[in-house]
Image (cartoon, rainbow, N blue to C red):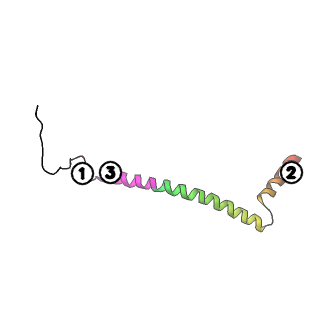
Amino acid sequence: MTTELHEGPLQASSSLTAPARLSWREKREVRRRRRVWFEEILGWILVPTILFGTYWLLDLILTTLGTSPAAILEGIEAIMAHL
């Protein structure tokens, strides 16, 4: 049994090097994956922002009209009690 001993610099194996060229389908798949990640991150940011903004706007409108969400819920409960 023998072993080969190399005393020079190490060479990169072919599996560690970047692919020569991507086909158009592979490029499209990479763009699609990036877009899906971008949309997912954007969704995690925009959905809570829209929900909090909607609540804030509704509260602002009700305050301007001289009422509050709690007063409206009490009114609805009073109507339901009389039914």
Q: Tell me the kind of residue under disc 1.
A: Thr
**Circles 2 and 3: CB atoms closer than 8 Å:** no
What residue is shown at x 15% (from left), y 51% (from top)? 9
Q: Tell me the kind of residue under disc 3.
A: Glu
50 relative to 25 in the view: left or right: right
Q: Dot 3, how many residues are within 10 Å of its Cα: few (below 14), some (14-19), or many (20+)?
A: few
Most extreme residue toward the bottom is 64
The residue indicated by pointer 2 is: 78
The residue indicated by pointer 1 is: 17
What residue is shown at x 36% (from left), y 53% (from top)? 30
Report the Cα–Cα distance between label 2 and label 1. Answer: 73 Å
Residue 10: x %, y % from top left: 17, 49
What residue is shown at x 25% (from left), y 54% (from top)? 21
**Which mark sits nearer the N-terminus, 2 or 3?**
3
37 relative to 5 in the view: left or right: right
The residue segment tinted magenta is 9-37
**Which mark sits nearer the N-terminus, 2 or 1?**
1
Q: Which mark is residue 26?
A: 3
Q: Tell me the kind of residue under disc 2.
A: Ala
Report the Cα–Cα distance between label 3 and label 1. Answer: 17 Å
Kind of element beneath mark 2: helix
